[in-house]
Amino acid sequence: MTHISVLKDESIDGLAIKKGDTIVDGTLGGGGHTFEMIKLYGLDIRIIGLDLDIDAFARTKNLIGDTPSQFTFVNRGFQDIDKVLIELGIKEVDGILLDLGISSFQLEVAGRGFSFLKDEPLLMTMKKDLTEDDLTAKEIVNTWDEENIADIIYGFGEEKYSRKIAKKIVESRSDKEIETTFDLVKIIDEAVGRNYRGMRIHPATRTFQALRIATNSELINLEQVIEKGFKCLKIGGHMSIITFHSLEDRIVKRAFVSLKEKGEAFILNKKPIIPSKEEISLNPRSRSAKLRIIKRII
């Protein structure tokens, strides 16, 4: 399984890395961005790699070989960036890179129910080793009330048929617990499949996106990492963020504009950087990606 990092060159170039810099790769994933930075800058920089998925370290190690002392992996979510840096004795960093896309490994190998094309347990958690306190998509569809389910499908998935889908979920779970991705896909298809006939998008796409976002508190965590991460940047430090849907991009854009209006930051690209036609042809999953870059100035 090969994961292709999206906007790899553009996002790394946006960090304006120099010898001696400390960079946080807040979404280690398949290790592609970190591998490229090590390839370009070798032992001249230090990289802190964060990921909730413990398997991210193994995937990165497969790419970079013997782990250099300048690379540190921390099995934490990026919303804890401030705490992680304090624990590592690092006061501030020169760059932060976030690639918010779900990796090919999670879609095709993880077995946690991210893809509606594979029959897997309905978990949708970025974290691999779960505790009883961790929320799962299975818990949401089987225990949340109809109104709340509809609200997250509409709010996080921008699904206009959210009420129909939520109603069908609640009706179906009264007969049998919803346990797998295919259980849920069948319910969605019965609820709104006919409304999607002739459309390029799968009927389950938006609902699965919404459940994944809700399960992992993705939008709240994104707001937190921008706020906390910016404070961890040195003056002159850069933050590159790659988003994959409008909700994420809206949060990043608004946060960056707010920092600019306060006089604290300079936005390096007024319009988001998008993949080239060549990149999209090589990696169709990159087509919705947008990169925004900010520089701290005070």
Image (cartoon, rainbow, N blue to C red):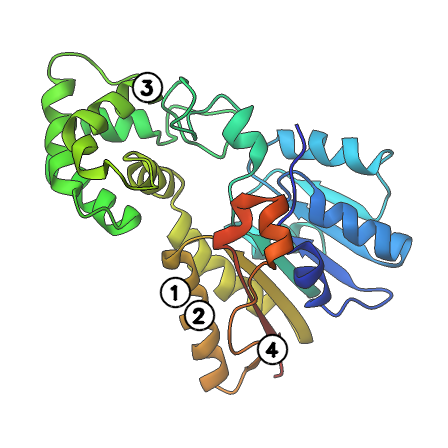
Residue type, label 2:
Lys
Q: Name the residue under label 3.
A: 182
* Percent of width and height locating residue 36: 78, 50
Secondary element under disc 2, as helix, strand or loop, is: helix
The crowding category of the residue bearing disc 1, from other C-alpha atoms within 10 Å (few below 14, some 14 to 19, many at least 20), is few
On-image quarter of the N terminus: top right
Residue at the image position 52 percent from the left and 44 percent from the top: 285
Q: Mark 2 points at which residue?
A: 253
Residue 175 occupies which quadrant of the picture? top left
Tag in front: 1 or 3: 3
What's the residue at 47%, 54% (across, down)? 288
Of marks 4 and 1, which one's residue comes earlier in the chain? 1
Left or right side of 33 for 213: left
Q: Give the residue drawn at x 28%, y 38%.
A: 207
Which residue is denoted by mark 1 in the rendering?
250
Horizontal and vertical percent position of residue 167: 10, 32
What is the distance, in whole Å, between disc 2 and disc 1 at their CAs?
5 Å
Residue 139 x %, y %: 28, 26
